[in-house]
Amino acid sequence: MNGLHAGVESTFTADGAEAFTVDAEIEVEPGESLVILGPSGSGKTLLLETVAGFHDHEGFVAFDGRQLTDLPPERRDFGFVFQDYALFPHMTVTENVAYGTQYHDETSDPDALLAELGVSPLSDRYPPTLSGGEKQRVALARALAIQPGVMLLDEPLAALDVPTRQALRDDLADVLADVTSVYVTHNRTTARALADRIAVMHDGRIVQTGTPEDVFERPASPMVAEFTGANTVDLSSAPSLRRLLNGSASPEGDGHAAIRPEAIAFGDPGDVQASVERVVREDATNRVTLSFDDVTVTAFADDPPSIGDTVGLRFPMDRIHHCESDSLDSRSRRL
Amino acid sequence: MATETDTRLVRDRVGTRPLVVAFIALQAVAFAGAYTYGRPTWYAYFMVGSTAVTAYVLDGSSFTVATATVGSLLTVALGLPLFLFVARQNPSLVAEKATDPGVHRVLYLGVYGPLLAAVLSLVLGVPLAHLLAEGFPGQPFVESLVDLPLVVPHSVAGILILFGFGQGGAFPQFSVLGTMTGMVLAMTFVSAPYAVNATRESFEAIDNRLEYASRIHGANKWATFRRVTGPLALRGMVTGGVLAWARAVSEFGAVAVVAYSVSFFYPLEGGEVTAQHAPVFVYNTYLQGGLAESGAVAFLLLAVSAVIFLIVRYLTDDNSATGGMP
């Protein structure tokens, strides 16, 4: 197949820590952005580094049908952007960006890339004098300069403050539009903004792969639901919601229901009556924590109720996704 | 009694540097006075006492006064011999030795031999340091071997070298006993650990991801060393080399056993000459000529060592290198 296809298994041991095994398979179509989304410690960085060739592994890595498994990193034709930049401190910005060009036939002009990313004025500076956002733009330019077959990005925004992160995220969306890329993050907003497809990783394994809509609206397990920010309701603790589901075409009420907070509407008469536990002001709206039966859910309200109020909640049937309790143990699901 | 706040105000107003200069000047005057009166012991008391008083005035806490006072005992033990040594030199004897061609040869050899040893330590030590920084199976064994010279008595090190490379050693047709090769080998044996360890530390300080970044963007291991890890570890290599050089300059035991006196090419006379390594020469002069004569030679050697010491301090104090991530 064309694009990147990798299935790797590798066990890592750090001093004083238990051995950790990454066992995952990913496929990325040409031009596609695959985001690997997972909590800290899920092994997503190790997976990316293994695909890059930094670690010994079992399995295979192939790109456009070419086997790369036994090739060292320098012969895999990948670009890599690191969370903490990894710029060469003894070289100027331009020298950093041009670093790999001498090893590749097709390259981009470093100056043009720096201009495109808005950091031309920095070309003669050394990395230790740059801000985080500037460093990451330079690091991005360095990776793009070799016109890599695949861009691998390891949480490139994680170390940046919020305004810088948003600005760079927009630029990344432009830059990665036509590039085959694998992007690792624990940030679901970033994932949703940049992904053509998302692979959710947990405990060294991929537990769900799909479009952002798939993963966010139809999580494969309560773990995925929770991590993507959906309400995860244990139906055995929520009889009123179970009754509601039984009345519809949805499966009978065991397991968990996942529903996104933005799908829950306020209004009487509601499907359930819930009491308001907490209201937290967020950027443009309010996050409201509500309880009914033995469960709590969150919803958004521009015009929030008061704490202690009883309000009606409406659950649109087509936005409720049923996930089996079985998958709670997040048993690996290979693609 | 001055409170801590008061004294800090005093210090802030005056600044630290004038206080340091005043303290050193006071010590110099006190030593000159005590020495002129022929009572250097008085100066020892004065140094301990003045340190205690200064600590009390500047800080006031009993803990600081106690550590400063006990600490000053050690500085007296280290400093007093040095001051007396300098003060008791006979200038005409020093001048005589300073113009003695024989002494020149010794000083030349005392700098040149160690330089060869330092270069050898680096050439062989840098690859090993890189390996040690990366880690490999059996590493503890190699580490122990590298650090062995730090704990082995140096005369024993000399004996080891003679067993290894002397008569009946690894090269039967060649013995290093009494040769320049033997001297450099003995110096390398005792100074290589410094070169290896300093270089290794600087390799270890380099973030792995700089190496990853270099590799993934196309550079193989050689190019990565040449363009990234080598330059970033350069300061560590220089430090290691200078430390090794300084260590070799001061080496006595191993050199005395392996190469008591050697012949070497001496550019100032344009031919082969024979001389001893400087520390050996000082000891030899002491045995044959007594304290005064060996003192004059020792004074010259001390001056050379002081210059080396300053170079070491200059090269190792600079922390502008960023081996880690910016």
Image: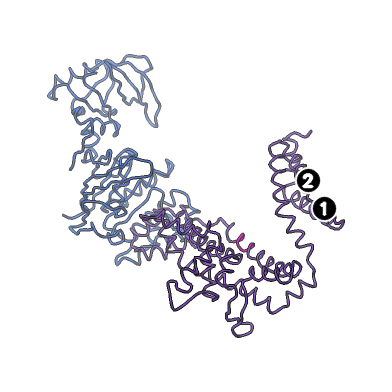
Chain colours: A blue, B purple
The image quadrant that residue A241 belongs to is: top left
Residue position for label 2: B50
Q: Chain of mark 2?
A: B
Residue A20 spot, x, y in % from top left:
30, 42
Magenta-highlighted residues: B309-314
In the image, is residue A17 part of the stretch drawn in magenta?
no
The answer to whether residue A162 is left or right of residue B113 is left
Residue position for label 1: B30
Q: Are marks 1 and 2 in contact (CB under 8 Å)?
A: yes
Which of B150/B31 is in front? B150
Is label 1 in a helix, a strand or a loop? helix
Residue B120 spot, x, y in % from top left:
49, 69
Q: Chain of mark 1?
A: B
Outermost residue on the bottom side: it is B270
Which of B308/A10 is in front? B308
The image quadrant that residue B99 belongs to is: bottom right
Q: Amino acid at mark 1?
A: Ala
Label 2 crowding class (10 Å Cα cut-off): few <14, some 14-19, many 20+?
some
The answer to whether residue A309 is left or right of residue B38 is left
Q: Quadrant of the C terminus of chain A?
A: top left
State the predominant SS element of the stretch in magenta: helix
When the figure is inspected, residue A292 is found, relative to residue B122, above or below; the finding is: above
Residue A280 spot, x, y in % from top left:
39, 25
Q: Which mark is residue A292?
A: none
Identify the residue at horizontal 73%, vertical 67% (top origin): B295
Q: Amino acid at mark 2?
A: Ser
Give how far apart the Cα atoms at labels 1 and 2 are. Answer: 10 Å
Q: Quadrant of the N terminus of chain A?
A: bottom left
Label 1 crowding class (10 Å Cα cut-off): few <14, some 14-19, many 20+?
some
